[in-house]
Image (tube, helix red, strand yellow):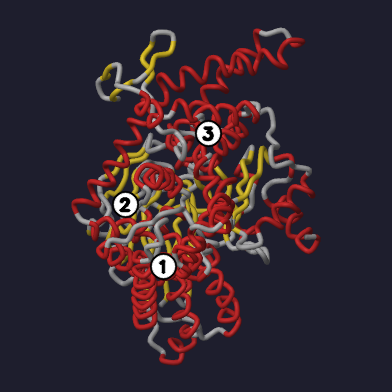
Amino acid sequence: MAKYEKLAKEIIKYVGGAENVNSVSHCITRLRFRLKDESKADDTALKNLSGVVTVMHSAGQYQVVIGNHVPMVYAEVCEVGGFTNESLTNNEEEDAPKGIFNKLIDIVTGCFQPVLGPLCASGIIKGLNALLAFLLGESFSASGTYAVLNAIGDAIFYFFPIILGYTAAKKFKVNVVVGMLIGAAFCYPTIQADTLSAAGEAMGNLPFVGNYFATFMGVPFVAANYTTTVVPVIIIVAFAAFIQKYANKWIPEMLRNFFVPFFVLIISVPIGLLIIGPVVSAFTSLLTDGFAAIYNFSPVVSGLVVGFAWQILVIFGLHWAIIPLAIMNIGNMGYDTILVGQFGTTFALTAALLAMCLKMKDKNKRTLVVPAIISGFFGVTEPGIYGFALPEKKPFIFSCIAAAIGGGVFTFLGGQQYVIGGLGIFGTVSFISESGDPTSMYYSFICIAVSMIVGFLLTYFFWSDHTNEESQITLNNKENKEIIASPLTGNVIPLKNVKDDAFAQGALGNGIGIIPSEGKVVSPVDGTISVLFPTLHAIGITSDSGVELLIHIGLNTVQLNGEGFKAHVKQGDKVRKGQLLLDIDLKAIEKAGYSTETPIIITNTKDMLDILPTDKKNVIRNDDLITVVF
């Protein structure tokens, strides 16, 4: 691991130093930092490090995408920075992500990330055991070998509440053994719905939640089958953290060692079983019923939507919101159909990378893409996404389209997933049923073939490598240019002086900056609104001649969530030069503590021969601002 020591030191340096780190963890491909001040991190410097794929900001985390060797890099980062995998500063409120949605995603990822590797390993073991049972017949199914392998593979699924009790306890700073005991209580055989219903008639029925077969201190106890469940135990451990906080406050220190766990368990478990569990189970059932309704309406639509959106969800870490629903489906029904639609995504992306490799003119890039193709085949796509497909745009879109078609075919055929298994090619065995039926596995091979063929053909025939095209354009002497007008009135500053490294170092393209003196933003070109961010702080325009512009009003103003901005256009609108796009409240932005410096960027700079900003110190709306030569 020492070979990653230099990389670890550089990563810590460019995230603002060890003193700027509240916590650090990792998933399959990413280091996930919580920083005290993200503005101290240098995105561009990190992206340029050998060994770093890219940098992402998502769900309140500062994510450094590394690739397959992230565990080794993480170990070195912890060693160099003096961190532990539980290290948090006392500034827990500063460390928490802002916004309800970000907090929910953070909780789900925090509880599931430590489980993902063992979960996939267990799924592979179960799948291989099912494959052996299919190949070797009943003699193997009745053997001790089958029983032992099944126990190894099935343990994490059967005792999932205990596992999540542990990870949730670490997330919410609860005594981890107490968290495990909460999970174990929910796995206890005599309180499962099947056990209680088999023991006698229902004592009554409660609206919305169903029959109950027992009471606790006179209160109806609505039982459920909690083994294999995922959400209830996480919510109950969060509630236990609340109880623990006040127990630590009120109980004398000399008695805390056993009385704090006593009160946490005696309060949280009964309330969890009587109230939280039934309510959460009812709510999650609505969500799973919603996905089931879409699937029942049209399996093809379900597969198309999940397949197309999956890679986009992964980029932002939002796929974690869907995985628990799939796990619950497997626990309740023995199979899942939600994740079936996404199975082709890694293969679609891998095929797109293969087509890019064949068409690349740069030998160095072709050498670099080969490892990304190999890792993609085994289910790890971040190096391919961030290093090659996403920067080129079209291959990424083509891979999403191919994944959608592959997912649609898979769900149309009736594919069912029986375990949350391995990634990439290792995931095929997760489609073998426990009874040894390999039908869905055969369908998965069809999904792989369709996804790869479509992804390869679309990329091969409709993507071109523009490397060295500039020299060809010059030789042909077909120079054209477009004058970009100023969208604002104000003082002009060179782009390198903008107080944001990503803009100042040209990571997003060349351009210029303006410090506006009035709050009117007009279109600098005739064109189309290609992007209008929901927070209205940034707007993208594609001119009729193909110049792609980004107007980013202020720095870090995304945090204002649209306050102080009013849009007069929407995404997809055709606009004319000088047309009013936005009204902005400059005083409100400054009062909130944000800079009004506004970069105007040519985002497809690499496709242009030259970008020539004005040398004026001040401009008014519609003045000539940038000359683009193409």
**Which quadrant of the structure image shows residue 402?**
bottom left
Q: Earlier in the sequence, mark 3 or mark 1?
A: 1
Front label number (3 vs 1): 1
Judge whether 445 appears above or below 55 on screen.
below
Picture mark count: 3
Rendered residue at 58%/51% (across/down): 152
> Would you name the residue on which mark 1 appears?
396
How far apart are the alpha carbons under marks 2 and 3?
25 Å
Q: Position of residue 522 (x, y in %)?
A: 31, 51
Q: Label 2 near label 1: C-beta < 8 Å? A: no
The reply to whether residue 449 is in sight is: yes
Q: Where is residue 80 in the image (x, y as percent from the top left)?
A: 79, 49
**Which quadrant of the structure image shows residue 395?**
bottom left
- In what quadrant of the picture does the N terminus appear? bottom right
> Would you name the residue on which mark 3 appears?
593
> Would you name the residue on which mark 2 appears?
522
Relative placement, left or right, of 404 versus 491 is left
Instruction: For label 1, count other residues whose C-alpha is less than 10 Å away and answer few (under 14), some (14-19) or many (20+).
Output: many
Q: Which amino acid does label 2 sit on?
A: Val
Relative placement, left or right, of 20 versus 6 is left
Judge whether 515 appears above or below 216 on screen.
below
Rendered residue at 45%/53% (across/down): 419
Q: What residue occupies the far left of the structure in this picture?
A: 297
- Given residues 273 and 141, the one toward you in this image is 141
How far apart are the alpha carbons under marks 1 and 2?
31 Å
- In what quadrant of the picture does the C terminus appear? bottom left
Q: Which amino acid does label 3 sit on?
A: Gly
Q: Where is residue 367 in the image (x, y as percent from the top left)?
A: 60, 81
Q: What residue occupies the far bottom of the structure in this picture?
A: 475
